[in-house]
Image: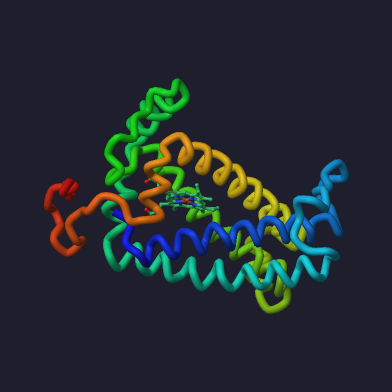
Amino acid sequence: MHPLPLRIMHWANAIAMVIMIGSGWKIYNDEVIFGFLHFPQAIVLGIWAQHGLQWHFFGMWILVINGLAYLAYGIATGRFARLFFPIRPREVAQEMIAALTFRLKHADLTHYNAVQKLLYVGVIAIVVVQVASGLAIWKPVQFSGLLALFGGFQAARLVHFLGMAAIAGFMVVHVALALLVPRTILAMLTGGPRVPAPEQAADGAPAPKPLH
Ligand code: HEM
């Protein structure tokens, strides 16, 4: 279900995200957007703002290189097409209600439900925008076109902040749901149930069935 490269990329991403969010909070504290919001020193990464920036750039390389590898892998192996699509609004609505009333089942680990598909595709899209808005505020002169696309420096900063909030929100829900079905965490560590290799699932063939 989760081949080794996928598992390595998933956990590398989780570590990079913790570094990016923790150090981002430290940088934010130096020049806040919302006067009422400061992140306590106990939960930020970095002793002073410049130190936080260094952590942020360190995490950035892991996030971007790993993220590009994950996108290339997901597209080239057909994993995205097989596991994330199609996303049907009707199923999302039905499964959202089931999830909110704690009736959503996750017996078959080899298939993601519609809510999962939407969340995974959504968080991947948000991370892409997050990297773009980060580039725009890191190099506003070199990426002036990108900066203009966001509506200027302060608007790009706000997008970057809201992207962080969305990713942090995703992480809370994602980890809580994973803890509710601990088998999924084990599968993300050990690989999970065996499924036919992607090349066996030719175009148009029925979705692969787990072998056990
Ligand atoms: C912000 C950080 C994270 C992001 C963006 C993220 C994103 C994702 C994505 C996109 C998938 C689907 C992967 C695929 O099939 O190609 C996934 C699966 C999964 N993630 Fe994360 N993840 C993050 C952190 C974590 C953490 C900290 C945990 C620890 C509990 C975790 C546990 C899992 C598990 C168990 C699955 C498989 C779910 C299943 O089989 O139903 N993730 N994650």
Give coordinates of residue 36: x percent, y percent.
86, 41
- Residue 78 left/right relative to 45: left
Vertical order, 78 against 119 (above or below) = below
Q: Between residues 188 and 70, which one lies in front from this camera angle?
A: 188
Compared to 139, does 8 lie above or below? above
- In the rendered image, the vertical position of residue 45 relative to residue 36, given as above or below: below
> How far from the left and from the top, in percent, is residue 128?
53, 61
Q: How is the image coloured?
A: rainbow
Residue shown at 15% from the left, 57% from the top: 201
Q: Is residue 29 left or right of residue 8?
A: right
Query: Would you identify the image quadrant in which residue 137 lies?
Result: bottom right
Dividing the picture into quarters, in which one does residue 138 lie? Answer: bottom right
Estimate the x, y position of residue 17 in percent, counting from the top left.
Answer: 59, 58
Q: Residue at x 38, y 23 (%)?
A: 103
Residue 23 relative to residue 196: left or right? right
Residue occupying the point 76% across, 69% down: 53
Residue 85: give x, y in percent of width and height. Answer: 31, 48
- Residue with the most extreme bottom position: 142
For image coordinates 35% across by 62% down, the residue present is 74
Position of residue 143 relative to residue 81, above or below, is below
Total number of numbered discs in the rendering? 0
